[in-house]
């Protein structure tokens, strides 16, 4: 595994703010080893932890199409089906792009509560969308 670019950005901002791993873990309600593994690229945080981490730094995790924000933070997960449809894609097409079974795409769109950052990123990339961390307005 490698450090996800969103995690790298959040880690850099965390360090610049002089927030310790222990302090960040306490803010997010996770263990210190979990944060260390995220920052080392050994594990990926959940989408919820990623969004909460960004918010703790006065930032937002956004989904964009290269021109405009199309989803923001935790509101992204329940909108996955809508985002796919807006892109004119079927679940089968997304499954083929992601090299996975269509049932896995269905489970993500219909039942996911807090998927991993890497899962969300791969799904959104298959839709032609990107992730970014921006300053909260």
Image (cartoon, rainbow, N blue to C red):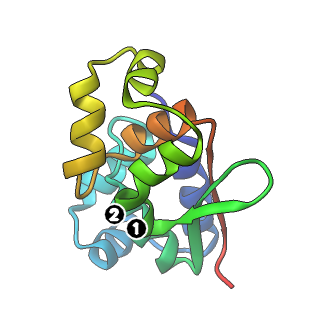
SS at badge 2: helix
> Most extreme residue toward the right, as rendered?
67
Q: Residue 5, position in %: x, y?
A: 59, 43
Residue that numbered label 2 is attached to:
48
Mark 2 or 1, nearer chain start: 2
Is 72 positioned to the left or the right of 79 in the image?
right
Residue at 33 percent across and 56 percent down: it is: 35
Q: CA distance from mark 2 to mark 1?
A: 7 Å
SS at badge 1: helix
Mark 2 and mark 1 residues within 8 Å of each other at the beta carbon = yes
Q: Residue 33, position in %: x, y?
A: 25, 52
Residue at 55 percent across and 74 percent down: it is: 18
Q: Residue 115, position in %: x, y?
A: 29, 49
Residue at 63 percent across and 36 percent down: it is: 128
Residue that numbered label 1 is attached to:
74
Q: Residue 57, position in %: x, y?
A: 55, 77
Identify which residue, 78 or 137, lies in the foreground: 78
């Amino acid at each position: 595994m490698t450090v996800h670019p969103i995690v790298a950005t959040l880690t850099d901002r965390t360090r610049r703010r002089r927030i310790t791993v222990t302090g960040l873990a306490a803010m997010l309600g996770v263990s210190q080893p979990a944060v260390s593994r995220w920052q080392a690229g050994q594990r990926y945080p959940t989408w919820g932890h990623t969004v909460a981490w960004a918010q703790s730094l006065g930032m937002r995790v956004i989904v964009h199409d290269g021109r405009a924000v199309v989803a923001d933070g935790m509101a992204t997960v329940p909108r996955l089906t809508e985002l796919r449809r807006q892109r004119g894609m079927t679940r089968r097409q997304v499954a083929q792009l992601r090299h996975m079974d269509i049932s896995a795409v269905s489970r993500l769109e219909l039942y996911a509560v807090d998927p991993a950052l890497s899962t969300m990123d791969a799904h959104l990339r298959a839709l032609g969308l990107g992730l970014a961390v921006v300053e909260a307005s």
